[in-house]
Image (cartoon, rainbow, N blue to C red):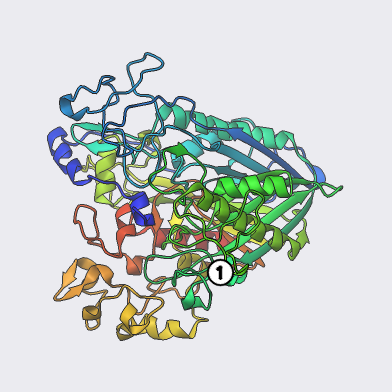
Amino acid sequence: MATSRSACIVRSVASLVVVLLALGCGERADAGASDAAGNDAHGADATAGPIAAVAGDRAGFASVDITPKELESYTDINGNGKFDGCLDDQTGGGKGGCDEPFFDANGNGTFDTAFIAGYGNQRAATGVHDPITASALVLANGDRYVVFVGLDVIGLGGDHVQKAQKELEAKGYDPARIIVSSSHTHEGPDVRGMWGSQSPPKIYSGANKAYNAKVRAAIVEVVEKAAATLEPAKLRVGKVRMRDRSPWFNGESWGGSNPETRTHGLIRDIRDPVVVADQVLSIAADRDDGSRIATWVGFAGHPELVGDKNTLLSADYVWGLRTYLEKKVGGGVVFMPECLGGMQSGLGAPTPLVDEAGAWQYEADGKTPKWATKESFEHAWSYGVHLGDAAIAALASGASFSADDLRVDRASFLAPPDNFELKLMYTLGLFDLDPELTVRSTDCPGWTPNDETHPGCLPQWVYRVRMGPIEMISAPGELFPELFWGLPTEDDRWAGESADPSKRGKARGSVFFPQHDADCDPVSWSETCRLKQKEGDCDCMSMHDVPYRIDASETVAVADKLTGTYKFLIGNGGEHLGYILPETDFHRASTQLGGNNGDHYEETVSLSFQMATLWRQTVETLLAAP
């Protein structure tokens, strides 16, 4: 399928109900982590540990290959690009739906592969297009330091991240200074477990626990390697919006020339309202001779441009960005995603084609760009190059800074899993989640002693990084951009469309709410429509909050409360808990079991309707710190 929503969808969810009823509900052990909800702030006076307190700015970079090594082949009998066999039936004899054989290269009787995270289930990798990596950048000054770790995976579980941090803590590192983020590539290995099989009788997780343990170990390894390479550095930061880079990056709705009207900054937001986060933030660490140590790049947008037919492991456009920058400016590259929700994706945005050297390709008129083939590696390459050029331009017009005032703080909260379908998948053992690290106590919202199906709350950390003119906040999932950046009130069209349903809808020329159903004009969103699929003739799944808000009581966005000149939201920071959307716009009846989700798909793969509120409250705690 061709949309980001299908990229995250878990098909055949209805079959889980049948299996659950057959198996019953398993018992889970209490975690007993009564202190998991406490706040933990680490400031500039924290012990430096193995990173020596040396005056002046320093930087260190390292990268570790985490590409899955065992990719056994199988026979795709029906040619659908999926493994329709069973993990323990090499012959694929047809019993119990095991319809396709595999080649057991290591003779262990199990199909050893990596299931690709994204689009439909059972997309077994048949090879590797580009390496899956763990990369780390350490910035230090005196006894202050921060470590940024970027992973080319869909979203490593917070339990693995926290275990890696504890291993590093035992080695003398401050875990509050180690920020791990997953790029969310939909062409990389499934580390969550959602993309295996949910088709009875063959039900298995897409996550390989042994592989996930290797990724966890790679976090420790890459941090230590990066810290060992620390050297004097000159630091620079810059920012630019993709919408300002070229008229070909914007559609007609935004005064541009891109053939897709909704494209804005090379992002096509397919959920109403159309709110885009297209900032490229870049940090460069250079040596005295001008050579590059490393470049840190942050951008919103799902790395899913290769599409759903691909069976080769890839970092998607992050591969293009990394490869291009390494050749163009030297050094290593660490990528971190920004606001991924809402829906931020370049999948449906026509992208100007570039060649291997990064040069734009034009039609015979020399003015009109050729377009990269959608859902292909040339699409991912071209997109990555455009981001790379934007990062270079941002740094050229940016500012030098020092990390002598660097401070990292963090605070915690408990995330309650009130999504019935995700709890169902957990009960079936599809998620690679350590139950010992969950909290099953009255501190966990919604937990009761007699509810044996409740997996418990997931302890989460939110980070705040400040250094020079830079200020960052993290979120443990795919945050909607309006929750961080705010609403597009600078656009005169917003006020009317947000407050008045009669101004919404494509036929009425709406640019922010084109999917609105005119039959919903007289219907109350908050009192009736958000609780059902239809209200009279109104398709509630096309409707959104009126007026659209980021919070029931708060009107000031998080970014507006930050004092830094260069602001950034670290998406998937420490965890990947699905979408984090405004509670005021959360459709409480949207489920994959219900079928028609319309414009409210994101709710079906969100851990909780409370996530945005809990995240916001935790951010306020951090912002209150000196």
- Is residue 65 found left or right of 493 in the rendered image? right
Amino acid bearing label 1:
Trp
Q: Quadrant of residue 121?
A: top left
10 Å neighbourhood of mark 1: few (<14), some, or many (≥20)?
A: many
Please tell me which residue is depicted at 44% across the width and 81% down the height of the picture.
Answer: 494
Please tell me which residue is depicted at 66% across the width and 64% down the height of the picture.
Answer: 239
Q: Name the spot of residue 387 as percent of width and height, x first.
A: 60, 57
Q: Name the spot of residue 178 as percent of width and height, x first.
A: 60, 43
Q: Name the spot of residue 21 as percent of width and height, x first.
A: 13, 39
Nearer to the camera, 492 or 576:
492
* Rendered view: 384 above or below 427: below
Nearer to the camera, 94 or 87:
94
Tell which residue pokes out farthest to the top in this image: 107
Secondary structure, mark 1, is helix
Q: Name the spot of residue 217 as percent of width and height, x first.
A: 54, 30
Tell which residue pokes out farthest to the right in this image: 289
* Rendered view: 248 above or below 141: below
Instruction: Report the quarter where the C terminus lies.
Output: bottom right
Whether residue 505 can be seen here? no
- Is residue 453 found left or right of 179 in the rendered image? left
Please tell me which residue is depicted at 16% across the width and 37% down the height of the picture.
Answer: 19
Whether residue 5 can be seen here? yes
- Is residue 591 found left or right of 321 in the rendered image? left
For label 1, the residue is 248
- Is residue 463 found left or right of 434 in the rendered image? right
Please tell me which residue is depicted at 33% across the width and 78% down the height of the picture.
Answer: 506
